[in-house]
Amino acid sequence: MKSVLNRVQKNPRQALIVGALGGLGLIYSTQNNKLSADNPAAVPYPHPWSHQGPLDSYDAASIRRGYKVYREVCSACHGMSEIAFRNLEGIAFTANEVKYLASQVDVDDEPDAEGNIGKRPAKSFDYFPSPYKNEQQARASNGGALPPDLSVIVKARQGNEDYIFSLLTGYDNPPPGVKLREGLYFNAYFPGGAIGMAPPLADGSVDYDDGTPQTLSQYAKDVTTFLAYCAKPEEEDRKKIGVKLIVGLAITAGFMWYNKRFKWSTIKNRRVEFRD
């Protein structure tokens, strides 16, 4: 103990650095392995998403399957009011495919001469329709709970993709001693553990045409990838711009080094003598 105190007195800056690093390590281990007081929910396990690397791209096939899962399952309760059908065009869908997908969904038409609002097939510029007319209807249909909009849900939740995937696959029986009121389900990844949404996915609930296994984890992975793309559609453009900037800066640095080494150095080292 005395030796430690002596070292602290001799080099307080080193002791401060070691203490700070130790505190950061403790915070990291606590946040990644245990529950915290301000977020009483299990911490999602980090998964190796194919689009998270600095040079990685979205999985187009997964986005296509994820849209199918959303349309057949999630859209019954959750809207995506900030996403238009045209936003799907590019990585996973062509322009003609987007037009076809939009035509399969009905949206509100313009009022007629008498003020009545009918329905028409959606077009590419239309936004995803909401399953409810207003918040009151949404709460009444879900036991008082308001289903969140999924437009940017991946960015709006701590843990991002890992949280969405863990939530969809984290339904389980409540632990001993925990009783849930009627209409609630236990999910360790939801704050408080009691969630009003019934398990939305199960093995075989959605048919895939490409031979991909129709399992709960696969559904969760695909719809999470789809939601991540909708929340961050510009991510790939940012990566491309970043690569171009890095290459441009590297070339510029090479020219600067050459100029400094072979051009400027001869001028810098030149000696001027004045003679009478």
Image (cartoon, rainbow, N blue to C red):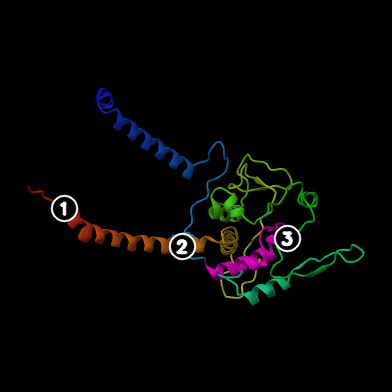
In this view, which residue lies farthest toward the bottom?
96
Residue type, label 3: Ala
Q: Position of residue 164 (x, y in %)?
A: 58, 54
Location of mark 3 (residue)? 76
> Bounds of the magenta span?
59-88
> Which residue sits at x=80%, y=56%?
133
Q: Position of residue 45 (x, y in %)?
A: 50, 51
Q: Considering only order in the chain, which callout, 2 or 3, is on the residue closer to the N terminus? A: 3
Location of mark 2 (residue)? 241
Mark 3 burial class by Cα count in 10 Å: few <14, some 14-19, many 20+:
few
Mark 2 burial class by Cα count in 10 Å: few <14, some 14-19, many 20+:
few
- State the residue in front, 194 or 73: 73
Magenta span: predominant SS is: helix
Q: Quadrant of residue 200?
A: bottom right
SS state under label 1:
loop
- State the residue in front, 112 or 18: 112
In this view, which residue lies farthest toward the left?
276
